[in-house]
Image (spheres, coloured by chain):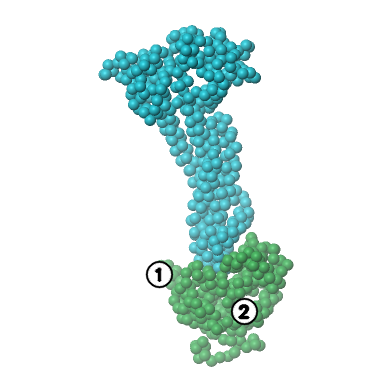
Chain colours: A cyan, B green
């Protein structure tokens, strides 16, 4: 008997057997369905979080160093940093003057403000003050218009670049470029609209933003805002050297003696990425363990029911053996049966988890790539084969005389 | 030509705790192609063990079993399965049909295991069912058939692969006497067509349909005698029995 024919016969028999015990088959499947739903949902959540993080982190350039008072990630107590001196806008020029490994340096100050155009208002907009260099520091793309030039920023011209959210809110059906908006009551002319950047981990929008020259920012909000100095490295491969150079320059600016610790922090994307990967790794590990456990329990259910099925059909196995079925034929028959239960469970599980992942996406970024669906199907098949192999092998080794005598 | 030859076959069952039961003792039988033989014996005589060995469902502990000239006494599971599939047609007392499958599929089974292509398989199964008079009931499941019909499905299944022997174990045991007689007449027809039939029974009147009766007692051949056409047993000298 050929393998193909054995397979076909095995399929037929398994369908008939499952059909004869529908409720049992469905109940057994339930274990696998739950397992596959949890595995794929967990996978979708992890993938989605990762994607959202990648999208969000791209707004923080990988080759940009951020000089700030506070570190982004630290195991030290916060009060160690509280007493540090604040950064000053003038540092940016000093760094630019001394640095050799940096392409651009820009100070950025920010706070929330209210923007008005005619009778329309946008609240809680992130108002940023900076210099023309920011366009070289960030990978800034424009939907329309341009950034302000060095001359314009040094001259503190009342010009503004807006994010897409602000543009959409204030100018639903118009071209914002050239329009006059009011930032805290003072007029600014829009010269550019940034491209959409999305949200940070789905929590807040990066596009609800207005950028103005730093001198104008101080006019509006005062001079007590302390900047972040953003510096882009010329050669991303040279991050470590550049970081050291920046530290040296900052220490010189601050006049620190060699025995003194840094009283500033140099932050970079890596810190966030590493922290995220660590957390994602832990969540993923725990999640996969828990979901694998549920699949394992489902697999035990399958094994159990397959033992019952083999025992129930002992006589039938005896008849088949008497008629010339080989061990392999019987083995394949029962393996196909357990695999079919699991495959069915896997497919039903996927049918549930796909819409569920869409629902979860409303609260948590979720993405179910095709590969995950494939993994789900393969996983369910694997559970079927693994949990079916012991009962199937027992069936295949039954003694035909004993089996025929079984009632 | 001998289809079956047993030479000094023994079967010992290990019952554990060093207790052994000798079910067959030095059995030597030979059966020619085209014979119609009944194997008789009370329960516990070893006739079922003998039938299992003849049917290649079991192997002897010692001794030689030649089936169609092939030594099967030391074959493994898979080779035995092949012999059962192609050389032996089983007819059981309890019919032993697969309950969920219809008559056609039941009859097809041996052909599936020997790898016959679908179309040929269906055709052969259909015509064999027609031969046993069930052409109208090929899609009936066993529980939709009467006892006699079920046994005829089983006979069709036994015949489908043109086996060297048909091994029938109490084929009328679960049938009323009228249906049983019909089945026995059917066996006679099969024998007339040249089939080799081995009938295992404990009923004298059933055994008398055969042309030769082998009586088993306490695991040994008690007698091995041909039957005269009128049904009377030929009296032979005890010395001849020993030779046989």
Residue at left offset 53%, top offset 50%? A381
| Rendered view: B179 above or below A113 | below
| Residue B182 image offset from top left, x and y in percent | 69, 76
Residue at left offset 37%, top offset 15%? A94
Circle 1 or circle 2, nearest the eye: 2
Residue B91 in sight from this viewpoint = no
> Which residue position is annotated with label 1?
B18
> Which residue position is annotated with label 2?
B195
Q: Which mark is residue A166?
A: none
Residue B226 in sight from this viewpoint = yes
Q: Locate the N terminus of chain B by quadrant.
A: bottom right
- Crowd around label 1: few <14 · some 14–19 · many ≥20 (10 Å): few
| Rendered view: A40 above or below A215 | below
Task: Name the image quarter holding residue A323.
Answer: bottom right
Left or right, A208 with reference to B14: right
The furthest residue to the right: B136
Both labels 1 and 2 in a single chain: yes
Residue at left offset 55%, top offset 38%? A368
For disc 1, the chain is: B
| Residue A77 image offset from top left, x and y in percent | 36, 21
Q: What secondary structure is marked by label 2?
A: loop
For disc 2, the chain is: B
Q: Nearer the viewer, residue A276 or A29?
A: A276
The furthest residue to the left: A259
Number of marks: 2
Instruction: Report if the CB atoms under discs 1 and 2 are less than 8 Å apart.
Output: no
């Amino acid at each position: 008997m050929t393998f193909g024919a054995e397979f076909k016969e095995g399929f037929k028999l398994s369908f008939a057997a499952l059909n004869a015990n529908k409720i049992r088959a469905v109940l057994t499947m339930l274990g696998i369905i739950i397992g596959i739903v949890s595995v794929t949902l967990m996978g979708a959540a992890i993938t989605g979080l990762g994607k959202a993080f990648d999208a969000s982190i791209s707004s923080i350039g990988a080759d940009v160093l951020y000089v700030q008072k506070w570190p982004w990630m630290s195991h030290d107590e916060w009060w160690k940093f509280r007493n540090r001196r604040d950064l000053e806008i003038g540092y940016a020029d000093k760094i630019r003057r001394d640095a050799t490994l940096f392409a651009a340096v820009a100070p950025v100050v920010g706070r929330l403000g209210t923007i008005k155009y005619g009778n329309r208002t946008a609240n809680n907009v992130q108002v940023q003050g900076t210099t023309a260099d920011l366009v070289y520091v960030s990978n800034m793309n424009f939907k329309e218009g341009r950034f302000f030039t060095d001359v314009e920023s040094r001259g503190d011209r009342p010009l503004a670049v807006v994010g897409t959210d602000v543009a959409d809110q204030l100018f639903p059906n118009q071209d914002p470029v050239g329009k006059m908006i009011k930032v805290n009551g003072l007029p600014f002319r829009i010269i550019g609209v940034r491209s959409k950047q999305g949200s940070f981990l789905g929590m807040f929008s990066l596009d609800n933003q207005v950028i103005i020259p730093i001198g104008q920012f101080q006019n509006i909000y005062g001079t007590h805002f302390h900047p972040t100095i953003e510096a882009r490295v010329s050669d991303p491969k040279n991050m470590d050297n550049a970081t050291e150079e920046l530290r040296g320059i900052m220490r010189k600016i601050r006049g620190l003696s060699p025995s003194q610790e840094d009283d500033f922090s140099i932050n970079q994307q890596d810190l966030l990425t590493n922290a995220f990967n660590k957390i994602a790794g832990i969540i993923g590990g725990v999640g996969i363990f828990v979901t694998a456990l549920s699949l394992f329990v489902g697999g035990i259910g399958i094994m159990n029911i397959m033992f019952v099925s083999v025992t129930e059909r002992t006589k039938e196995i005896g008849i088949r053996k008497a008629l010339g079925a080989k061990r392999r034929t019987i083995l394949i028959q029962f393996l196909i049966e357990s695999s079919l239960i699991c495959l069915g469970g896997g497919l039903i599980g996927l049918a549930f988890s796909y819409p569920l992942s869409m629902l979860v996406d409303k609260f948590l970024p979720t993405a179910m790539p095709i590969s995950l669906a494939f993994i789900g199907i393969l996983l369910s098949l694997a559970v079927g084969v693994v949990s079916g192999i012991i009962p199937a092998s027992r069936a295949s080794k039954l003694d035909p005389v004993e089996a025929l005598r079984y009632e | 030509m001998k289809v079956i030859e047993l030479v000094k076959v023994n079967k010992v069952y290990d019952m554990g705790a060093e207790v052994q039961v000798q079910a067959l003792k030095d059995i030597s039988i030979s059966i020619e192609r085209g014979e119609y033989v009944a194997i008789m014996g009370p329960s516990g005589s070893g006739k079922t063990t003998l039938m299992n060995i003849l049917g290649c469902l079991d192997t002897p502990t010692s001794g030689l079993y030649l089936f169609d000239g092939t030594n099967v006494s030391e074959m493994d599971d898979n080779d035995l399965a092949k012999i059962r599939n192609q050389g032996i047609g089983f007819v059981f007392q309890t019919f032993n049909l697969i309950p969920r499958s219809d008559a056609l599929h039941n009859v097809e089974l041996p052909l599936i295991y020997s790898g016959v292509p679908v179309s040929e398989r269906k055709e052969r199964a259909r015509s064999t069912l027609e031969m046993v008079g069930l052409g109208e009931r090929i899609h009936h499941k066993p529980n939709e058939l009467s006892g006699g019909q079920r046994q005829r499905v089983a006979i069709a299944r036994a015949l489908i692969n043109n086996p060297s022997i048909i091994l029938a174990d109490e084929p009328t045991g679960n049938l009323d006497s009228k249906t049983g007689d019909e089945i026995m007449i059917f066996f006679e027809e099969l024998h007339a067509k040249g089939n080799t039939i081995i009938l295992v029974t404990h009923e004298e009147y059933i055994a008398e349909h055969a042309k030769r009766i082998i009586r088993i007692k306490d695991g040994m051949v008690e007698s091995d005698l041909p039957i005269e056409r009128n049904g009377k047993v030929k009296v032979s000298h005890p010395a001849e029995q020993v030779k046989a």
